[in-house]
């Protein structure tokens, strides 16, 4: 009975905010949403952000409340937010917020369209519809200019985007599948994802890599690049898979250590970086 009461209370609070009461103390558990809140000029409402959020505002940095997938529940309660922003996959936190009667908004973040939808929704929540629309137009205009700036050749180059692996080896390699916004950026650059399977982030063995044998491998591993350096990461391929076409041809590209990879306005810098790495020759 108590759980039912808390669920109904959480729904009522969520409905009250959605009906027009602009939240003034919000928590963002995701770097992408934090970025977009700043982009539309609503960062003054942020009372707490996750450890991985980047803060670009001149305002003081809000309290950090833990990792994206495991924020401190004690901190969430202590900060007394009137709304929490997170992703739909964070079901354990959503359950906690329901039980605590805390209003929240859960966003999708797989596709470019999800970025646009999130910006529009944040614009409505904070009464900054014009600013949100400007950001959407800015991203769409850049993608359109990018599509016009590259020359499409057939067959298209087959690119494998790596977003996770162990340093010093080629173990636990995770690539980008076809259902991700990064795949859409590849399409805008007139190249093809070497992986065409159904998994969103396939884990690839060396045998799987050999079967794909991409023309170019692009590693987007900013955290590892900061610690180990891009040159060290590139050497892993020379030692571990010299037989791959991309390795033989010197077609291994390491993303800069400061590159942000998140579904937000950060795609503006990301698409520039991808274009530079893909068309470096």
Image (cartoon, rainbow, N blue to C red):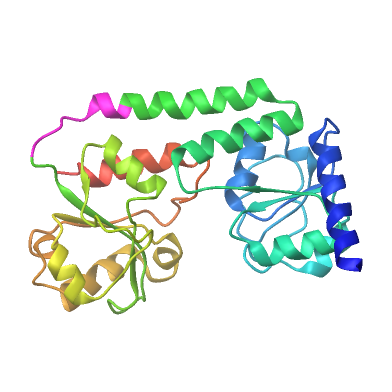
Residue at the location (24% across, 74% down)?
A: 236
User: Position of 122 compared to 256: left or right?
Assistant: right
- In the rendered image, the vertical position of residue 132 relative to residue 75, given as above or below: above
**What percent of the width, then of the height, locates residue 263?**
50, 46
Residue at the location (62% across, 30% down)?
A: 120
* Magenta-tinted stretch: 146-154
Q: In which quarter of the image is the C terminus?
A: top left
Judged from this view, the residue extending furthest toward the top is 130
User: Position of 265 compared to 158: left or right?
Assistant: right
**What percent of the width, then of the height, locates residue 186?**
29, 43
Q: Viewer-proximal residue, 101 or 5?
A: 5
Q: Quarter of the image holding residue 102?
A: bottom right
- In the rendered image, the vertical position of residue 270 relative to residue 97, given as above or below: above
Q: In which quarter of the image is the N terminus?
A: bottom right
User: Position of 251 compared to 218: left or right?
Assistant: left
Specify whether residue 65 is in view: no
**What percent of the width, then of the height, locates residue 192?**
21, 46
Residue at the location (12% across, 59% down)?
A: 250
Q: Viewer-proximal residue, 95 or 209?
A: 95
Specify whether residue 46 is in view: yes
Q: Within the magenta stretch, is there residue 148?
A: yes
Q: Viewer-proximal residue, 272 or 74?
A: 74
Residue at the location (75% across, 41% down)?
A: 59
């Amino acid at each position: 009975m108590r759980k039912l009461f808390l669920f109904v209370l959480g729904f009522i609070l969520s409905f009250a905010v959605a009906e027009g009461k602009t939240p003034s103390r919000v928590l963002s558990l995701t770097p992408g949403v934090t970025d977009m809140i700043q982009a539309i000029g609503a960062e003054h409402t942020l009372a707490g952000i996750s450890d991985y959020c980047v803060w670009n505002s001149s305002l003081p940095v809000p309290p950090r409340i833990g990792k994206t997938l495991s924020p401190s529940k004690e901190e969430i309660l202590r900060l007394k937010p009137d709304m929490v922003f997170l992703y739909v996959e964070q079901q354990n936190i959503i359950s906690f917020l329901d039980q605590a009667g805390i209003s929240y908004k859960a966003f999708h973040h797989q596709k470019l369209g999800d970025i646009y939808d999130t910006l529009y929704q944040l614009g409505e929540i904070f009464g900054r519809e014009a600013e949100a629309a400007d950001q959407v137009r800015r991203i769409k205009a850049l993608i359109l200019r990018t599509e016009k700036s590259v020359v499409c050749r057939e067959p298209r180059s087959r690119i494998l985007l790596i977003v996770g692996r162990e340093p010093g080896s080629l173990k636990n390699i995770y690539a980008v599948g076809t259902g991700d916004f990064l795949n859409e950026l590849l399409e805008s650059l007139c190249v093809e994802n070497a992986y065409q399977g159904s998994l969103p982030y396939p884990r690839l063995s060396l045998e799987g890599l050999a079967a794909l044998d991409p023309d170019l491998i692009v590693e987007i591993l900013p955290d590892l690049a900061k610690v180990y350096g891009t040159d060290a990461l590139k050497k892993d391929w020379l030692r571990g898979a010299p037989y791959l076409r991309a390795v033989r041809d010197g077609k291994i590209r390491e993303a800069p250590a400061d590159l942000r990879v998140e579904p937000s306005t950060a795609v503006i810098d990301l698409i520039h970086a991808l274009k530079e790495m893909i068309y470096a020759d």
